[in-house]
Image (tube, rainbow, N blue to C red):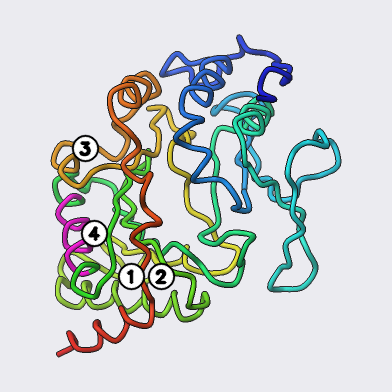
Amino acid sequence: MRAADVKLSNVDKVFFAAAGLSKGDVLDHYRAVAEAMVPHLTGRPLTLRRYPDGIEGNSFFQKDAGDKLPDWIHVETVPQRQGGTIRHIICDDAATLIHLANLATIEFHIWPSTTADLEHPDRLVIDIDPPPGTTTRRLRGIARKLADLYRQVGLTPFVQATGGRGFHVVAPLDRTADFETTRALANTLADHLAVRHQETLTTAQRKDKRGDRVFLDTNRNAYGQTFVAPYSLRARETAGVAIPLDWPELRRAEPDGFQPSRVRNRLARKPDPWQDLDKHASSVEAAQSELDTLRP
């Protein structure tokens, strides 16, 4: 494994002051989760969020690989919708993960499609995005409602605590539909639920139109958009980690309730709940047909 060749730097630098975590602790986290995390990164264009001086310092998003990476890191030239290309990093192994973490990458964000077929996503993602003050109990209920709707239309729902404020409800897809068709389904699913729960849910894009309702965000279902990768740290004081959950675990899960030490203990006693996700891939067109029958 090339990870032994990655030269680490500034491991004592404080990255999460409130949580008492150094850059070395961040590197330890990514070493510990690499076996579970890398399969969720493999083949997917990455957007990195880097914090050279920790989460209280300046940060920047990196899409283009640049020209300073070791030649063993996988880079793919990816067309952009607006024209041109970007050379995206692809993380296919633990060594790449550790190298990127050593570049002060705290957050890893992934495309919902892979380089095998960039135009056809294999993930549908609805992000449950709450306003301040929303209870976790309410968020759990919304995640379950989304899961029930997914199942009604033939999708298999998976849930992730984002490490931030909410949850993702994800469905694996068979790559037969393009992004436009997939996003249309995601929009219709979100609208279907929001219409039936108008007091608590919204699909309004403008924040000033949402009030105290929870936003069902479908924006990740587009070419070039990303969602937070499973097992990625989040750049927040709580040092939460994005964690795939079994549905029964949702009963006690907090969106940002998994810190690195808890994640290490978790992976030591149970496998990744998303390890077989792709075995449940479904058709967007079939799901849309089923959803059409549910409309009043």
Gap between marks 4 and 2 measured at Cα = 14 Å
Q: Determine which residue is flagged by label 2.
A: 205
Q: Nearer the viewer, mark 4 or mark 3?
A: 3
Q: Nearer the viewer, mark 1 or mark 2?
A: 2
Q: Quarter-wise, where is residue 246 in the image?
A: top left
SS at badge 4: loop
Q: Determine which residue is flagged by label 1.
A: 209
Whether residue 68 sits left or right of residue 64 in the image: it is: right
Q: Is 36 rendered above or below residue 110?
A: above
SS at badge 1: helix
Image location (x, y in percent) of residue 127: 36, 57
Q: Determine which residue is flagged by label 4.
A: 212
Q: Determine which residue is flagged by label 3.
A: 253
Q: Residues within 10 Å of mark 3 (few under 14, many from 20)?
A: some
Q: Which residue type carries mark 3?
A: Ala
Image location (x, y in percent) of residue 253: 21, 37
Gap between marks 4 and 3 measured at Cα = 22 Å
Which one is earlier in the sequence, the residue at label 2 or at label 3? 2
Which one is earlier in the sequence, the residue at label 3 or at label 1? 1
Gap between marks 2 and 3 measured at Cα = 27 Å
Which label number is shown at residue 171? none
Whether residue 82 sits left or right of residue 188 in the image: it is: right
Q: Which residue type carries mark 4?
A: Asp
Q: Is residue 24 magenta?
A: no
Q: Is 47 rendered above or below residue 148?
A: above
Q: Which residues are magenta?
A: 140-149
Image location (x, y in percent) of residue 108: 55, 41
Asked whether the residues under the numbered discs 1 and 2 touch, taking CB atoms below 8 Å apart as contact, a structural biologist would say yes
Q: Which residue type carries mark 1?
A: Lys
